[in-house]
Image (tube, rainbow, N blue to C red):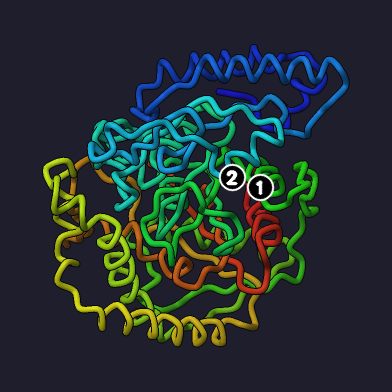
Amino acid sequence: MLPSLRELGMSLRSRELSATEHVRDVLDRLAADACNAVVTLDADRALAAAAELDDELARGRWRGPLHGVAVGVKDLIDVAGLPTRAGSNVLADAPPATVDAPVVARLREAGAVVVAKLHTHEFAYGPTGDVAATGPARNPHDPSRITGGSSSGPAAAVAAGHLPLALGTDTGASVRTPAALCGVTGLKPTFGALSTAGCFPLSETLDHVGVLAPDVHAASVAWDVLSRPDGTGGGIQAPGVSGVRVGLLTDEYWRPLDPALAAAVEAAAARLQARGAQLHEVRTPMIEELAATYAVIVGAEAYATHAKWLADRPQDYQPITRERLLPFADQPARAYVDAMRTRRRLKAALRATVAHLDVLLLPTTRLRATPIGAAEADVDGTTVAVRPQLLALTLPFNLTGWPAVSVPGEVADGGLPVGVQVVGVRLEERGVLRVAAALARN
């Protein structure tokens, strides 16, 4: 495993470790990856960039804690000189991007070294990570299981210890669900906080750029760098949750199907309370109706993007992606407009219901990682569709646009990872990360 970002940054700054040595080590790890997390390695340019950063440091210029640090980028986000194929044969012949997406450019300015494009669920249209032209991504904790999606490669690469940081996108679950299933930290910021320019769209109304990292500290450094033109990774709030008002959602909608997930949230709530947080139970009677708008909005916007390709070359899509998109060809415009209006009304109602709280605490998913290719799972003798269970607890916060982070929860049964989600109501990203940091198990 790689050292923590804190330790790595200290080693690089002191020149005990060179950026070239670190990047070469990461490239070797990625080349030997067994999780199918890697789409393209950019070895020559990464090593050249690392050498330049070593020279800068030798001359006394240090760009901050990402100076010389290797990062990976989901293959939905443009990296200059590399094609963006979005996990699809539709873009098999895509030319190299001519410029970096703004989020990639910002990381480079801070001294990060882009080493690879990473696996994504095809066109980001799925929460499982096992549908792509290059085959399924595999969970480092059990290669027969899904990573979650659609930021499948970033989560798997970070969880496997190949990378200290990766960029992903999140339209309904796509950073937080793979983070939860792979046992890492995933931050979805407030809608619009990070530019989605240079990212292949799924739903412009709900798309977010996010980060995946081994721990909350690394995610906090990345957020500080990405969110401020002069961010250096130093704008991290001191720990502490005394007086923070934490909402526990009691409606049936929010209840996970796996008891280990409920236990993880209970343990997290107890930990926060022991550190001075105030716990408040709250009901959200509008949540079912609000959540129902998600599929209508995303489906309509995704179909609009793909309509011509679906007509001209349907065979280039993975079958399940094509089957999910085609029904929206017949969806009336009124359904989309109604969904957008309902979303706007119920977003305001949800905000009013929880306005007295600072954050919400809940599971990230209703299930843990399921077998690759399994569309259904058996839960206590009842068969449930997998995909909705991986989306249900995250998508409301794409509809609202509130910041949310998934962190590894306590696994009482010693099994696969579980995710606990902290959602900002009155707190913005730094506050949400501060609460998440209090859940870290030292």
Q: Which residue is mark 1?
A: 226
Residue type at tag 2: Val
User: N-terminal of the two: label 1 or label 2?
Assistant: 2
212 relative position to 244: left or right: left
Q: Quarter of the image containing the N terminus? A: top right
Give x and y (percent) for residue 267. 55, 58
Element class at badge 2: helix
Q: Nearer the viewer, residue 248 or 179?
A: 179
Give x and y (percent) for residue 389. 30, 60
Q: Quarter of the image containing the C terminus? A: top right
Residue at 75%, 71% (x, y): give it. Answer: 243
- Look at the picture and state if 340 lies above or below 140: below
Residue at 61%, 60% (x, y): give it. Answer: 193
Give x and y (percent) for residue 14. 82, 19
Residue at 43%, 40% (x, y): give it. Answer: 182
Give x and y (percent) for residue 169. 46, 50
Q: Is residue 260 visible?
A: yes
Q: CA distance from mark 1 to mark 2?
A: 7 Å
In the image as oriented, which residue stretches furthest toward the right?
60
| Label annotation for residue 72 | none
Residue type at tag 1: Leu
Q: Nearer the viewer, residue 366 or 146?
A: 146
- Look at the picture and state if 349 lies above or below 440: below
396 relative position to 408: left or right: left
Q: Which residue is mark 2?
A: 103
Q: Nearer the viewer, residue 42 or 360?
A: 42
State which quadrant residue 379 falls in: bottom left
